[in-house]
Image (cartoon, rainbow, N blue to C red):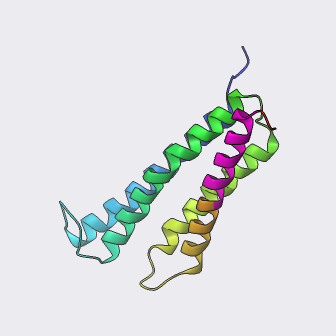
């Protein structure tokens, strides 16, 4: 039996693993700083928590758009490449959030995330309008 949404399935698996990694990093700092609840008032723990939450805020939209594009018959190598770039960008963002000052990795993560969201949204809208 063929897999109906192979790119979406791989993207969801990657997202789950990445979310686990981000959560694990939060847990590391919770243990190190003995913070059971809440955050550390804007310090490293807060930044890691925000990195994970930012991932959770954006990734469902990416996954839904990827699934919709794939269901519409427009999934191919380019879509898998976009998902790969998005996941790498989210890793960069998580690492960049560890810095006290603006970090290139964070900026790259933000830029690729925004471009992915707007690009997939526009492409999905063009599919829905039967333009592509």
Name the side, left or right, on which 17 lies relative to 116.
left
Question: Residue lying furthest bottom in this view?
Answer: 101
User: In the orientation shown, which residue stands out farthest toward the top?
Assistant: 1
Magenta residues, start to end: 115-129
Task: Tell me where residue 48 appears, x and y as whole percent.
Answer: 38, 67
Quadrant the N terminus occupies: top right
Residue pictured at 25% horizontal, 65% vertical:
31
Residue 40 in picture, x, y percent from top left: 23, 73
Residue 96 part of the magenta segment: no
As drawn, 93 above or below 132: below
Q: Which residue is drawn at 53% across and 67% down?
A: 93
Q: In this view, does 89 lie above or below 67?
A: below
How many marks overall?
Answer: 0
In the picture, measured across the screen, residue 93 lies left or right of residue 132, that is: left
Query: For this rendering, which residue is in front, 125 or 50?
Result: 125
Q: Look at 49% across and 66% down and name the residue there.
A: 94
The quadrant the C terminus occupies is: top right
The residue sitting at 67% across, 41% down in the picture is: 125
Is 63 left, or right, of 45 in this rendering? right
Q: Where residue 64 sits: x, y (%)? A: 57, 38
Q: Position of residue 57 (x, y in %)?
A: 44, 52
Location of residue 34 (image quadrant): bottom left
């Amino acid at each position: 039996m063929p897999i109906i949404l192979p790119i979406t399935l791989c993207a969801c698996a990657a997202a789950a693993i990445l979310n686990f990694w981000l959560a694990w990093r939060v847990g590391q700092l919770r243990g190190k700083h003995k913070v059971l609840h809440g955050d550390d008032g804007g310090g490293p723990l807060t930044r890691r928590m925000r990195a994970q939450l930012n991932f959770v805020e954006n990734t469902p939209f990416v996954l839904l758009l990827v699934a919709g594009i794939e269901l519409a018959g427009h999934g191919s190598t380019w879509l898998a490449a976009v998902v790969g770039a998005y996941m790498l960008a989210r890793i960069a963002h998580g690492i960049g959030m560890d810095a006290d000052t603006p970090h290139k990795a964070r900026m790259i993560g933000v830029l690729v995330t925004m471009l992915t969201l707007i690009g997939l949204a526009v492409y999905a809208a063009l599919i829905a309008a039967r333009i592509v």
